[in-house]
Amino acid sequence: MVRLRVYGADGKLSPARDMPKVELSDAEWKKRLTPEQFRITRGKGTEQAFCGGLLNNKGEGVYVCVDCNLPLYRSNAKFESGTGWPSFYEPVAKENVHEEADRTYGMVRTEILCARCDAHLGHVFDDGPPPTGMRHCLNSESLKFVPNEQLASIAEPAGAATAPATKPAATAPATKPSAASPRTGSAQAEVVFAGGCFWCVEAVFEELEGVKEVVSGYAGGSAATANYEAVCTGDTGHAEAVKIVYDPNKVSYEQLLKVHFATHDPTSLNRQGNDAGTQYRSAIFYANDQERQLAAAFIADVTASKAFNKPIVTTLEPLKQFFPAEAYHQNFVCRNPNQGYVRAIALPKVEKVREKFKAMIKVGGENRAP
Ligand SMILES: [Zn+2]
């Protein structure tokens, strides 16, 4: 048991109450979390500075633990620290954020963890602004943002003004405590698309609401040659591709196809702009027959609509395996906003998706790339 404060149906924080901890095996966490969320919250990882989706989020509401939904920080304690990570001068309740000495990397730091599920959140430093002078330095990936108007979605029975045990059960509909079901709508699907340089394709899809993670990598060839140097020769069969992990309740496969076709040229054979070679081909890698049929129907529709004045050359290929690319290719655009190619080619594509698909852009997403 641990003493915690949670939100009740009245949208108010409860007094501190003894509540059960959330303890799951690594295998169970892996089922609930994206690989990046697992790496950071369960493996004490750190996201790339300036690349987190919540860094510049200015919405009013509460930041909860991505693993167990425990409220951790309020938007009114968020400040611009210039560090590249979301920063807060105090937690929503001191009970909810646990501090522990961290002596890794030859430094003495104070790690902060979710008090209910032990998710790694980040570190706390004493160089913050008034009134506390503290800087809670967070990973966006450890958090989920809940706008004020949606606070009811994180209400828990333990947050009721009266302790639940003393309340007649009939007055409230039976809702599972969130400890038992930490993530609502945890449905998750993956697709693999190719459309030229993966830096650009990754940056475009990172913008979309419902997209949880985009990984740059290689598809269409074998494991032996799934590395940048080999793929660059154009002889390995691989295409530079991205794996998009998404919530099908929030964004559909067809919407992803639509964005893909609007942000690269599907009529350009083995070439996007100056990038030429089969590794830059336009391709959809399908994982099953349903995806193959949907993609084929989509291409037939686009062809029939005459949206392009040349034939679509996008290939439909079975996804045998996706190989993540080297670490320095991941999040390349947001880590290298001033690089020449990024400025000339990638950022205009990001602008285009923000403009053309306004309604689909995620909260805070406008700040993933400058
Ligand atoms: Zn938690």
Image (cartoon, rainbow, N blue to C red):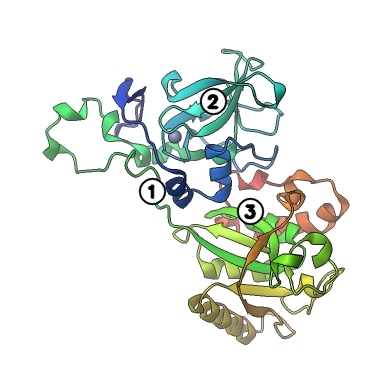
How many numbered dots are placed on residues in this image? 3
- In the shown orientation, is residue 252 left or right of residue 199? left
345 or 39: which is nearer to us? 39
Proximity of marks 1 and 3: CB atoms separated by less than 8 Å: no
Q: Residue at x 52, y 30 (%)?
A: 75
Few, some or many residues within 10 Å of mark 2 (<14, 14–19, 20+): many
| Residue 274 on image: x %, y % | 87, 68
Locate ligand 1 by image quadrant. top left
Residue type, mark 3 in image: Glu
The residue at which mark 3 appears reads as 206
- Identify the secondary structure beneath mark 2: strand
Name the residue carrying label 2. 112
Callout 3: helix, strand or loop? Answer: helix
Q: Residue furthest front?
A: 224
| Residues under numbered marks 2 and 1 in contact, where contact means CB atoms less than 8 Å apart | no
Q: Is residue 136 above or below residue 329?
A: above
Q: Quadrant of the C terminus?
A: top right
- Placement of the N terminus among the 4 image quadrants: top left
Q: Can see residue 218?
A: yes
Q: Residue at x 47, y 61 (%)?
A: 248
CA distance for labels 3 and 2: 27 Å
Q: Amino acid at mark 1?
A: Thr
The amino acid pointed to by label 2 is Ile
Q: Is mark 3 within 8 Å of ligand 1?
A: no
Q: Is residue 5 above or below residue 339?
A: above
Q: What is the x, y in percent for residue 335?
A: 76, 44
Q: Which residue is mark 1?
A: 184
Q: Position of residue 23 (x, y in %)?
A: 39, 37
